[in-house]
Amino acid sequence: MKKVILGSVLMLALSMSFVSCREAADKAKSATDEAGAAMEQAGEDAKEMGSDAMDKASEAGSEAMDKAAEAGEDIKAGAEDAASDLKSKAEAAGDDIKTKANDAADDVKAKAKAAIN
């Protein structure tokens, strides 16, 4: 009878250890699956963040090019205005010089006539 009871206890202990080992293996497999899923999600998140960063960099570069083009147009317009102003002032100065040269020539003629008379 002792053998039967001890055998039953031994069988019960063995069955408990098999169940316990199976549960531990299942938990380990579940944890591995969860870790794999988390790593996959982290990889997808990193890929998405990289894509977003590239999009933002592209947008920033595009905006910088647009602003540079606008600045170039502003500089060109300013240079054209300055050239136009310079041309107008040069023409006005040329007209003044021509008028004063004519006045001086008229004065010389008048004084030459006066000297002749």
Image: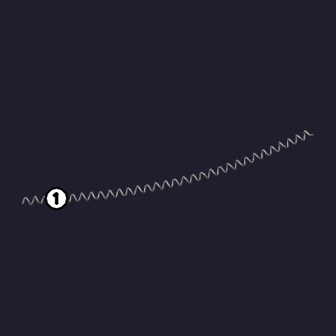
- Is 103 displayed left or right of 71 in the figure? right
The residue that label 1 is drawn on is 14
Instruction: Residue 70 in the image: state x and y as whole percent.
Output: 59, 53
Query: Which residue sits at x=88%, y=40%?
Result: 112
Q: Quadrant of residue 31?
A: bottom left
Count of numbered badges drawn on the protein: 1
Instruction: Residue 30 in the image: state x and y as whole percent.
Output: 29, 59
Q: Amino acid at mark 1?
A: Leu
Residue, far top: 115
Which quarter of the rendering shows the C terminus? top right
Query: Which residue sits at x=76%, y=46%?
Result: 94
- Is 43 displayed left or right of 64 in the figure? left
Q: Residues within 10 Å of mark 1 (few under 14, many from 20)?
A: few
Q: Quadrant of residue 21?
A: bottom left
Q: Quadrant of residue 16?
A: bottom left
- Is 103 displayed left or right of 60 in the figure? right
